[in-house]
Image (spheres, helix red, strand yellow):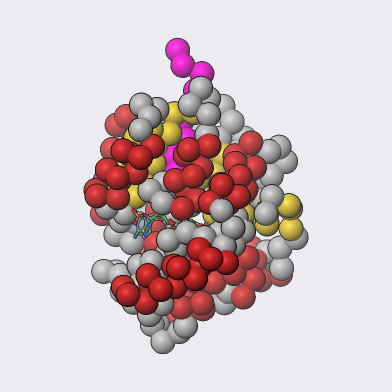
Amino acid sequence: MSNKKNILITGATSGIGFQTCKLLSPEKFNIIGTGSSKKSCANATKKLNSDHIQIFDCDLSDNNSVHQLSETIKSQFKTIDILVNNAGTLYVKPQLDSKGIEKTFSVNYLGHYLLTRLLIKNILNSNSPRIINVSSVAHKRGVLDLSKLNDVNLTSFQAYSRSKLAQILFMKILSEKLHTKNVTISSLHPGLIGTNLLSKNGFLGNLLTVGHKLVGKSTTSGAKNVLFNIEAENTHNKYFSNSKNEKLLNHANDIDKASELWDFSAKLCDLPIKLEI
Ligand SMILES: NC(=O)c1ccc[n+]([C@@H]2O[C@H](COP(=O)([O-])OP(=O)(O)OC[C@H]3O[C@@H](n4cnc5c(N)ncnc54)[C@H](OP(=O)(O)O)[C@@H]3O)[C@@H](O)[C@H]2O)c1
């Protein structure tokens, strides 16, 4: 029997996620990645050129697509040892998804909430499970008003920072719900990294991406910060910025808000509020 760990990394087709796949040891990990389209998955699979990596397409803003992905994964892998909720985007002009939810929130947070819940039994099947949310320092400026998730009259930064705050609150509430289980849940800021994060914005996105890549650090630097959370001890229920533990500000530590977010997300995903484990 193989001693390799199964690691699932969303957003493995580009930037930090792609580089993390490259840096993970093939002797230790069997990598399952995701990307937003069949085309980007095929390109990344070709570039990574390794028989220990499979990449599946899934649009995280679409609940049906997330259900399909989880069914595919469950049919092939009984255990997911590590889930890295890394995929992300930023829409310069906030827009709604098919559920009527602002799409940055739905890709960066809600799709990951649904995926994590659908795979939770497979994750807890591991001897030393980990769940890692790739958030951002931007969460510090995030404001989460659940009555405004369908509001597109906010700036792209407001939408992005809100989604990144939600990822941290998700870590908090999931840690509470799983407190009797041996699971390590953490979140992180990977650094300012030159990637394609701003690219899904047409021509403006191309220009912004050039600037982002000029000022940002290498994807290797970002991936190393993800690897830290994959490997380090004592990371549970903590937030790391550039691999250093940082105390959360009050609004990111607010367990009542985190609980409200959990219940609201369950409704948006047609899931029971109670986590079945
Ligand atoms: N770069 C930074 O400075 C920075 C700073 C702080 C935090 N972060 C966080 O780091 C994470 C990785 O981003 P990155 O900087 O590496 O950006 P990136 O190069 O654009 O990679 C983003 C990944 O997310 C996937 N993705 C985008 N929209 C999706 C959707 N609707 N459904 C499913 N997957 C989708 C992309 O897939 P496709 O390529 O297939 O579309 C890609 O694999 C994000 O969570 C981001 O918020 C980045």
Residue 29 among those drawn in magenta = no
- Does residue 120 appear in the picture of this structure? no
Instruction: Please report the residue visible at 34 percent of the width from the left and 50 percent of the height from the top.
Output: 35
Relative horizontal placement of residue 85, taking residue 225 as reference (left or right): left
Choose between 42 and 111: the one closer to the eye.
Answer: 42
- Does residue 17 appear in the picture of this structure? yes
Instruction: Please report the residue visible at 38 percent of the width from the left and 29 percent of the height from the top.
Output: 50
Residue 8 among those drawn in magenta = yes
Instruction: Please report the residue visible at 57 percent of the width from the left and 62 percent of the height from the top.
Output: 216
Q: Quadrant of residue 120?
A: top left
Numbered circles on residues, count? 0
Magenta region: which residues?
A: 1-9
**Looking at the image, which residue sits at the far bottom?**
153
Relative horizontal placement of residue 5, taking residue 152 as reference (left or right): right
Choose between 237 and 244: the one closer to the eye.
Answer: 244
Residue 131: image x %, image y %?
A: 54, 44
Residue 46: image x %, image y %?
A: 31, 38
User: Quick check: 161 above or below 266?
Assistant: below
Instruction: Please report the residue visible at 38 percent of the width from the left and 72 percent of the height from the top.
Output: 205
User: Quick check: 183 above or below 78?
Assistant: below
Quadrant for ligand 1? Answer: bottom left
Q: Quadrant of residue 96?
A: bottom left
Choose between 197 and 130: the one closer to the eye.
Answer: 197
